[in-house]
Amino acid sequence: MGEAKQQAREAAQSPAARGLARWGLVAKGGLYVLVGAIAFQVSALDQGRLEDRGGALAALADEWYGKLLVAGLAVGLAGYAFWRFAEAILGHPLEGGERDSFPRRVGLAARGAWYLGLCGLAVAVLAGAHQSSGSQDEDRITARVLKWPAGRWIVAAVGIGILGTGVFNLWRGVTGSFRKNMKVRKMSRLEDRAFTIIGGVGHVARGIVFGLIGFFLVRAAYQYDPQEAVGLDGALAKVLQQDYGDTLLALVAAGLIAYGVYCFVEAWYREV
């Protein structure tokens, strides 16, 4: 058993696996840049409509070159999922360090499953099987789960988990703890400073969006109303509905683009 685990670890730490993990970070960043750019277009130019990840991918795939980009994103998202699954199974981060706790391993597996789902979404877009319906997807899924035994508690638990992710991202953005696994020693002083600012702004924006999604899921459970549930596009729409919504949405959109750029830099400098 120990030999099999060692072989699995060597495979996960191979140059090909590391390269796939880095491409996964690029794909992750590409999704955030795409969603942020669409949101910025809505806020600044009053053109188009807010999109979730699926809708953004579908919009990108309208042209032949867009389909190539979506295919590349699908490969990268699969690589990111593989990386997180490998971390979860091996029980410690691939960059080395102490053995992970069981809750962290569960969290890593959940992240792998999430990005594997996004990979499937990209494949569905390429196959023409995905039609963007925005937050209606969240309505349907939430309504279905609310009908389950203890469904209200399940929806509330998921909402609290997403809300916690938002708070965690805010904490990382404010404290700069996202620098932990980065090869900052290889950056110049100017690069380090720029990376810290971009990463901080990006994590705060991501935290705000996740916080809104989690908050409205919890409210959907409390009010027993699936229409309260929102996805990424719905969370951005909530920002747009506020006073000075165009300005606020532009700031959040810029933050999401900054988070995407952070992922690009992370792909180059992260220890994997």
Image: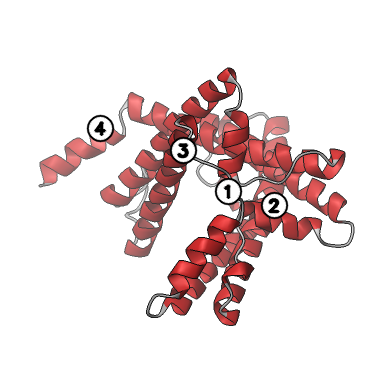
Quick check: 196 left or right of 223? right
Look at the image and name its color scheme: secondary structure
Helix or strand or loop: what does disc 2 sit on?
helix
Q: Amino acid at mark 3?
A: Ala
Numbered tag placed on residue 178 in the rendering: 1
Say which label, 3 or 1, has the lower sequence index: 3
Disc 1 residue type (three-letter): Phe
Q: Is residue 184 left or right of residue 253?
A: left
* Circles 2 and 4: CB atoms closer than 8 Å: no
In front of the other: label 2 or label 4?
2
Residue indicated by mark 3? 129
Task: State the separation of the CA atoms marked 2 and 1.
Answer: 14 Å
In the rendered structure, which amino acid carries the disc numbered 2? Ala
Frontmost of labels 2 and 3 is 3
Q: Is residue 110 left or right of residue 91?
A: right
Tell me where residue 20 appears, x and y as whole percent.
40, 29
x and y percentages locating residue 208 in the rendered image: 68, 58
Judged left or right of residue 7, residue 85 is right
Residue under numbered circle 4: 11
Q: Residue at x 58, y 44 (%)?
A: 132
* SS of the residue under disc 1: helix
Of tags 3 and 4, the one toward the viewer is 3
